[in-house]
Amino acid sequence: MQIVSGIAEIRVFRQSRGGVTLGLVPTMGYLHEGHLELVRRARRENDLVAVSIFVNPTQFAPTEDLSRYPRDLERDFALLSGESVDIVFVPDDREMYPSGFQSTVLIKGVTQPLEGARRPTHFEGVATVVAKLFNIFQPDRAYFGQKDAQQSVVIRQMVRDLNFNLEVIVCPTVREADGLALSSRNKYLTAEQRAAATALYRALMAARHLWDSGQRGADKLRAAMLGVLTAEPLARVDYVSTANPASLQEWEGEIPAAEGVLLSMAVFFDKTRLIDNFLLTSTESE
Ligand code: AMP
């Protein structure tokens, strides 16, 4: 497994191997089974697998957790080596954003609600860094997690709008045995907060149970999620949402079953902000 920090080295790697497919898994490191599932899928579907590890400063607001975001590159390299990854890209900030950097990718509609409403500069940072990674690697396929549902919708929109010649593949959310979605940020939780954090999954399950029994009222589904979350004293709800999975606009009234619903939420445990979601359609759940 090659470990490189320069864009020029990625270009050499790519150009020296013509006529083969490459799958890219962009990450911010501190890897867990959720990331590794993306890597395994990429391994199955491509000749070459590349993973990027870059804690992208432009997707964090000044008030957010950039400086304390967990990092452990040696552990990450060992995990990736165990998955037969071909190349790991670990640029520093100056490699990605050299002095004089002036360009961004701004996506309109789908970046506005949900996470975008609470983190107004977040998706501009995400889209810009992912566009750069796509240009650097020229992957055939890029792998993202359903855990960050809106991010996947945003990336798909960008790929469509800007004609990136690749396939976006979204993989299911990997969870702990008690339902908590794996996240590098789970490390911030105290033992008590960790126990309380199952409230997100329990809230999603409550709404899913209603949906499965035929409930289509958006307000009823939101109330079910809020009921579970507000019963948890350590949880502070940022938002709960029942949105159109394609446009991400909030459903009001009866949800057309054929279009489905993205149940999603962000919840604070002290300063730690966790997100989770279920994608429900008339035929399948999540
Ligand atoms: P991050 O390092 O948090 O930026 O995540 C890198 C990629 O892994 C993103 O596409 C995430 O959606 C995905 N990911 C993070 N957590 C999970 C999870 N629990 N299950 C599946 N994918 C995940």
Image (spheres, rainbow, N blue to C red):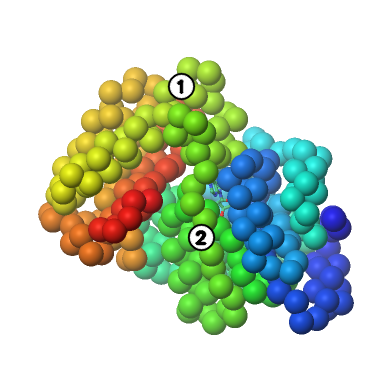
Of labels 2 and 1, the one closer to you: 2
Question: Marks 2 and 1, Cα distance to the nearest angstrom?
Answer: 28 Å
* Residue 119: image location, x then y, percent: 45, 50
Residue 50, image x and y in percent?
73, 61
**Residue drawn at 84 percent across, 70 percent down:** 13
Residue name at image x 78 percent, y 46 percent: 82
Which residue corresponds to the image point at 57% horizontal and 29% vertical from the top-left?
A: 188
Left or right of 87: which side holds 27? left
Q: Earlier in the sequence, mark 2 or mark 1?
A: 2
Q: What residue lies at 18% left-to-right and 62% top-to-bottom?
A: 256
**Residue 209 numbered mark, or none:** none
Q: Which mark is residue 195?
A: 1
Residue 26 visible in the current orientation: no
At label 1, the amino acid type is: Ala
Q: Which residue is mark 2?
A: 170
Q: Quadrant of residue 249?
A: bottom left
**For residue 20, above or below residue 206:** below
Q: Quadrant of residue 138?
A: bottom right
Residues at marks 2 and 1 touching, judged by CB atoms closer than 8 Å: no
Residues packed near mark 1 inside 10 Å, few (<14), some (14 to 19) or many (20 plus): few
Under tag 1, what secondary structure?
A: helix
Farthest residue to the top: give it: 192
Quadrant location of the N terminus? bottom right
Horizontally, residue 26 falls left or right of residue 192, namely right
Q: Nearer the viewer, residue 57 or 245?
A: 245
In the image shown, does 46 or 196 lie closer to the viewer? 46
Asked where in the image residue 203 lies, by quadrant, the reply is: top left
Where residue 66 appears, as percent x and y from the top left, is 62, 42
Mark 2 nearby-residue class (10 Å; few <14, some 14–19, many ≥20): some
Element assignment for label 2: strand
Position of 238 relative to 105 (above/below): above
Under mark 2, the amino acid is Val
